[in-house]
Each structure stands twice: as structure tokens, then as C-alpha cells.
Image: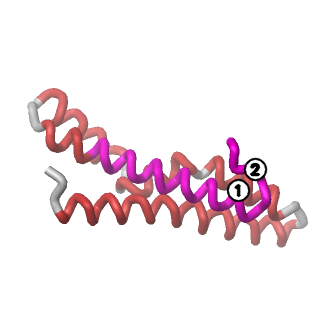
Amino acid sequence: MLTRELLATLIIDFFVAFGVIIGGAIIGGIGAFLIGKPPLSVIHDLAGSLKIWAIVAAIGGTFDAITNIERGLFYGTHDDLFKTGFMILAALCGAHSGTVFIQWIVGDSIAS
């Protein structure tokens, strides 16, 4: 079940979600600096609000994931259901890791 291709997909999903959080927050912080807002505060806020978009970007859009979940539930192809679940979990871990990394960079407590 855990093939080489699936493992590669999970690693890519993790790092895509991680990169969306890091890149989006830092580029948003640059924009905040240009308009006179406090960049670290904006970076922190963006890291939290970009999580769902990082997950969606990492799994390649929501319609494919929903179709795979439907196929797994109603047509008995449980491998698709597990693969999609693992992909969502990997993307969620990447997005959360990116958020924790940004919180560490801006000096927020990591206990949350």
C-alpha cells in the first residue's frame, strides 16, 4: 500500500504546504512593510490564515480529493480513500510545521 510513488507524493505534499505558508507569510510581510504596517505582526497573522490554502494547494485542488473520497466510500476502492487521507494528513503536517516555524521566527510562543 505504501509504495514509492505514494511516499514521494506525501513528501511533496508536505513541502508544498510548508512552502505556501513560509512564502506567503514572508511575501505578505514585505507588502506590509511597504504600506507601513508592522511586518512581524502581519507575518504571524498570515501564517495562521493561510493554512487551509496551503492544504488545498498541496493536494492539488479539492475536487480530486473529494472524488477520491467518494470513490473510496461508495465504490469500494479503499486504497483511494487511504491515499487521499494520507495526502491530506501530510499537507496538514506541512502547513502546521510552517506555521510553527513562522511563530518561532517572529518570536511567538510555540506552546500553542
| Residue under the point 39% across and 52% down | 90
Residue at the farthest top position = 74
Task: State the residue position of label 2.
Answer: 109
Give SS at disc 2: loop
Residue at the farthest front position = 111
Type of the residue with mark 2: Ser
Magenta span includes 80:
no
Q: Nearer the viewer, residue 109 or 76?
A: 109
Query: Label 2: how many residues lie within 10 Å, few (<14), some (14-19) or many (20+)?
Result: few
Give the percent coordinates (x, y) of residue 85.
Answer: 30, 42
| Residue under the point 18% across and 64% down | 4
State the separation of the CA atoms marked 2 and 1: 7 Å
Name the dominant secondary structure of the magenta segment.
helix
Q: Nearer the viewer, residue 94 or 57?
A: 94
Q: Check the image and tell me how it is coloured.
A: secondary structure
- The quadrant of the rendering that contains the C terminus is top right
Examine the rendered structure and indicate whether residue 26 appears above or below residue 64: below
Say which of marks 2 and 1 sits in front.
2
> Mark 1 and mark 2 in contact (Cβ < 8 Å)?
yes
Give the percent coordinates (x, y) of residue 77.
Answer: 11, 37
Task: State the residue position of label 1.
Answer: 103
Task: Mark 2 or mark 1: name the one nearer the start of the chain.
Answer: 1
Magenta residues, start to end: 84-112
| Residue under the point 73% across and 60% down | 43
Give the percent coordinates (x, y) of residue 63.
Answer: 32, 44
